[in-house]
Amino acid sequence: MCGIVGYVGRKRAAPILLEGLKKLEYRGYDSAGIATLDEGKLHVVKRKGRVEELVSAAENLEGNIGIAHTRWATHGAPSERNAHPHSYGGVAVVHNGIIENAGELRAECEARGETFSSETDSEVIAHLIAAAFRGELLAAVREGTARLKGSYAIAVLCEGAGNVIAAAKRGSPLLVGKGGGSVLASDLPAAAAFAEKVYALKDGEFALLTEDDVRLFGGELKEIVRDPLKFDLKEEGAGKNGFSHYMRKEMAEIPVSIANSIVDLKAQSRFLAINIVLCQTYYIQIVACGTAYHSGVAAKAAIEALARVPVEVSVASEYRYRDPIVPKGTLVIAVSQSGETADTIAAAKLAKEKGATVLAVTNVAYSSLTEVADVCLLTHAGREIAVAATKSFMAQLAALYSIASALADIKGRSAPSLVSLPALAEDALARSERVKGWAQAIARSKSVYFIGRGFDYAAALEGSLKLKEVSYLPSEGYPAGELKHGTLALVGEHSPVIAIIGDEKVADKTMNAVFEVLSRGARVFLVTTVEGLGEGTLPKEDILTLPACEGVYSPLLTVIPLQMLAYETAVLFGLDPDKPRNLAKSVTVE
Ligand code: F6R
């Protein structure tokens, strides 16, 4: 999390840096700051809150060279004091990542009389580089970063070093670019907005940016020659397209996102590498976090049902620390929208070390995860700006169902066709407008329970996460049959239950749970693909019937009204669903 950006060229740096920060704000938005060098002197401006707060404060900042940062707090509360850039001894630093030995290094600096002005782990980087600076900034950055444990992408300005920005990367993403000046940024769209040629730095590498050139260096500061990235950012439409929020606009893009992410892996030669891997697959482990984990839960159910290949699905942060057993021939599928989630990347690396083949399912080409993976299946959700994942979840499901279908074929089984799913999702989206009425009741509740069985359980988990994320209401997703083993104690008049039934085979069983909660006084809202279900039991307005769909693929439909419900509830509370408190889009720290 955190976004960093840098610019050196012939134009004033501040407007470019602010523009870059706005593009990176999805990575964190609790404070922001900017530093420029003007006539050799450092000028730093910082503000608590969103980038917008910084705009007027940085208006008069002069200088054609600068670095900037938008923060998601790890060490130290969100405040102006803890905002980046951090400066010491004429050195200013912006940092994305976590320095794990910051306490120890800070104590060393303090012992030699240096004072600190923040509680962050990042400030120590400025101290180390200032101590190492003897006229050559890159050498000082190398010496300073050699002491760091943890992850970092940093950009450094220094009085007395000339008009240069030095950068270093280990474990956090960093891209540099040139053309009309030189830039650096945490992601491709931000770098590509200001540069014609963009290069991705690898772990352990450094870069030196001047007005005319960008140079890349390896660990020993030996210069590296690298090809620029090939990219096409046409699909990166950034406007709200007439919607009040990105979240709602991105939901409107769900059908296209699904259509673009369904692939017939068996039919196209460009997927040969994936096919070869699938042909050798008898056991799968899926690793992911948050919403991507929920797509993994749905994929496990689908792959096991369709291909009869056993699948284990793990939260990546658990997987990486439990010394997982990875039998020979295991395929590990790492699912991540951003491709930058630290825990997912670490889990993928660990799986590789243990001999697994890693298949990345990600929305971002050239992300850190694609570097680690053996093979990659890109989802085509387009850029997702709202922090809460909506269309990218659907794209993940589409890609994972495509894998399930190909695997079923390889195993000599048949899987239902995926082709009608975008049209069904379009229909489901239109019908979901009705849940606006439900949001009134949800907003009055103390807590909300989402229940589902089998394929519907993944939908329940995701519906609950979405509601928590954007409306801040306590909520839980639960297997329908498990409710009576404890959680039922919490259900009552002020705790509505959302029942999800997309799989007709278990409809009666989940309806049993519905009766159980109804008789304890809870209001039940039913989301189902089964025509006529719930009628006579629930008021008509509490039932949302979606188009009929194969149960195995039904989370692609049933999650749509749940996303809508979360969105409408947040709007009702007057919250900004695009930027929920305490969260960030890309979780690049553990
Ligand atoms: C929820 C959400 C998060 C992410 C999680 C993993 O709406 O967006 O739970 O799903 O942080 O992110 P990626 O998919 O980028 O690895």
Image (cartoon, grey):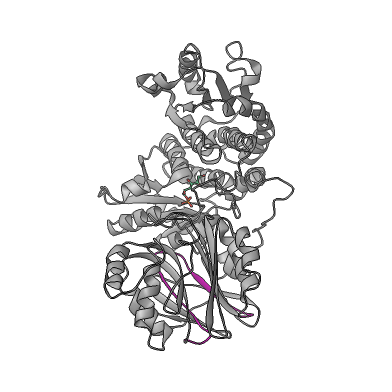
Left or right of 356, for residue 252: right
Residue 523 belongs to magenta span:
no
Left or right of 390, for residue 296: left
Task: Estimate the x, y position of residue 458 in percent, counting from the top left.
Answer: 46, 35
Residue extending furthest right?
242
Give the magenta range: 161-181
Task: Estimate the x, y position of residue 579 in percent, counting from the top left.
Answer: 57, 48
Residue located 54% across and 62% down the image: 32
The residue closer to the viewer here, 258 or 406, is 258
Camera sees residue 182: no
Q: Up-down: is 151 above or below 183? A: above
Task: Estimate the x, y position of residue 84 in percent, counting from the top left.
Answer: 48, 65
The residue closer to the viewer here, 416 or 135, is 135
Left or right of 251, for residue 389: left
Left or right of 69, for residue 369: left
Q: Up-down: is 276 above or below 127? A: above
Q: Up-down: is 222 above or below 547? A: below
Number of marks in picture:
0
Camera sees residue 124: yes
Q: In which quarter of the image is the C terminus?
A: bottom left
